[in-house]
Image (cartoon, helix red, strand yellow):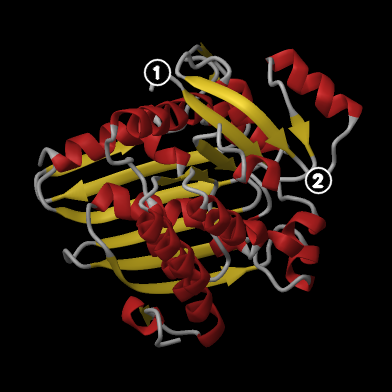
């Protein structure tokens, strides 16, 4: 097989982003894209990318024998049924995060994937970021010794709309889930305990909807390391994405990406541009790389770099964080294993 024949379910922001990147990949062939709202604008956009078919019925993708793989870019509450149907139809799957808002449903979907013997990759695109990959490489190579502290800062430039908040699953499942995955990735160890504190300091509407917009989360890892994650829905200076791994032999840290590295120094101070504004800018190249690696893994029969279990583990941590916030105590991950909660 020289090319992977692909169908995309969901033509929102992330679905279109993946489609635009896939059309530039010589080993990808997008055959069809579906969305519940098929407009003339969507048809024109698809035609401009050379996508031959647009439909409002996702089953036309899942049931098409000519399609090898499905990109699931639809709302989170549709992921589990779409994964299930795609797996049963023998399609390989790329699914945006989270797989679901309930890790037990995710476990059921992953069992369908295992039974069908298809490939599933989860869209934790930050693992493919050039900065974070380098940190992982150095930690894995032992350059900082045994990890002792993992520090992750993740702050958005502006809060999302109230409509988005309502269906997001909350800060832990929607936003911090990337950081939970990054904590496992950078440390090379599983999280064993979570303690979360949160507040509403950015937008009172978020609190009225039962969510928080500011959080500090502490983690314990199986290898003995400790972790700290800080989240905010509003950093006025731009998208704030920094990490540090401190270990027995040193530390490695990465700062924010900026549009350029120019600094102006005057008597009034030293000034540089703000960080890249949001995730589409900051992680542009990582989105390209994650889809490239998915395609190559499917075509070459290799293991994908981030699989369904990675999604499952991050969702359990998010669940434990929410439990910790509500109950005001540290929560051990064993408390939220399948069948216990």
Position of residue 3 measured from the top left corner of the image (x, y, whole percent): 45, 20
Q: Quadrant of residue 63?
A: top right
Q: Are marks 2 and 1 in contact (CB under 8 Å)?
A: no
Q: CA distance from mark 2 to mark 1?
A: 31 Å
Q: Which residue is mark 1?
A: 2
Q: How many marks?
A: 2
- Crowding at dot 2, Cα within 10 Å, few <14 / some 14-19 / many 20+, comes out as few
Q: Is residue 124 left or right of residue 238?
A: left
Q: Residue at x 56, y 47 (%)?
A: 155
- Say which of marks 2 and 1 sits in front: 1
Residue 123 in sight from this viewpoint: no
Q: Is residue 133 left or right of residue 317?
A: left
Position of residue 32 measured from the top left corner of the image (x, y, whole percent): 67, 30
Q: Residue at x 68, y 62 (%)?
A: 201
Q: Residue 36: which numbered mark, if any? A: 2
Quarter in which the C terminus is drawn: bottom left
Q: Secondary structure at mark 1?
A: loop
Q: Secondary structure at mark 2?
A: loop
Q: Nearer the viewer, residue 219 or 91?
A: 91
Q: Residue furthest front?
A: 65
- Crowding at dot 1, Cα within 10 Å, few <14 / some 14-19 / many 20+, comes out as few
Q: Residue 270: which numbered mark, if any? A: none
Q: Is residue 185 left or right of residue 270?
A: left
């Amino acid at each position: 097989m020289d090319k992977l024949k692909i169908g995309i379910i969901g033509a929102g922001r992330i679905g279109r982003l993946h489609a635009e990147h896939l059309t530039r990949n010589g080993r990808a062939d997008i055959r069809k894209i579906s969305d519940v709202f098929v407009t003339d604008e969507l048809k024109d956009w698809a035609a401009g990318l050379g996508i031959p078919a647009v439909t409002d019925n996702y089953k036309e993708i899942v049931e098409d024998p000519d399609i090898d793989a499905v990109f699931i870019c639809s709302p989170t509450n549709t992921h589990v049924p779409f994964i299930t149907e795609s797996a049963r139809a023998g399609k390989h799957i790329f699914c945006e995060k989270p797989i679901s808002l309930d890790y037990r449903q995710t476990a059921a979907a992953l069992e369908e994937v295992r039974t069908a013997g298809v490939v599933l990759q989860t869209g934790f695109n930050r693992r493919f970021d050039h900065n974070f990959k380098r940190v992982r490489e150095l930690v894995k190579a032992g350059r900082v010794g045994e990890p002792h502290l993992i520090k992750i800062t993740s702050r958005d430039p502006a809060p999302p709309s109230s409509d988005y908040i309502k269906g997001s699953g909350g800060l832990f499942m929607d936003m911090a889930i990337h950081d939970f995955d990054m904590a496992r990735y950078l440390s090379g160890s599983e999280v064993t305990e979570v303690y979360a504190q949160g507040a509403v300091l950015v937008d009172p509407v978020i609190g009225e909807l039962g969510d928080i917009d500011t959080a500090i989360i502490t983690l314990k890892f199986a290898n003995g390391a400790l972790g700290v994650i800080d989240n905010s829905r509003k950093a006025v200076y731009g998208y704030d994405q920094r990490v540090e791994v401190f270990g027995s032999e040193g530390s490695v840290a990465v700062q924010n990406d900026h549009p350029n590295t120019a600094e102006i120094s005057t008597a009034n101070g030293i000034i540089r541009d703000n960080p890249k504004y949001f995730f589409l800018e900051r992680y542009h190249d990582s989105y390209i790389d994650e889809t490239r690696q998915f395609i190559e893994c499917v075509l070459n029969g290799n293991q994908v770099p981030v699989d369904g279990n990675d999604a499952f583990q991050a969702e359990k941590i998010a669940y434990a964080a929410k439990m910790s916030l509500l109950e005001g105590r540290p929560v051990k991950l064993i408390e939220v294993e399948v069948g216990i909660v």
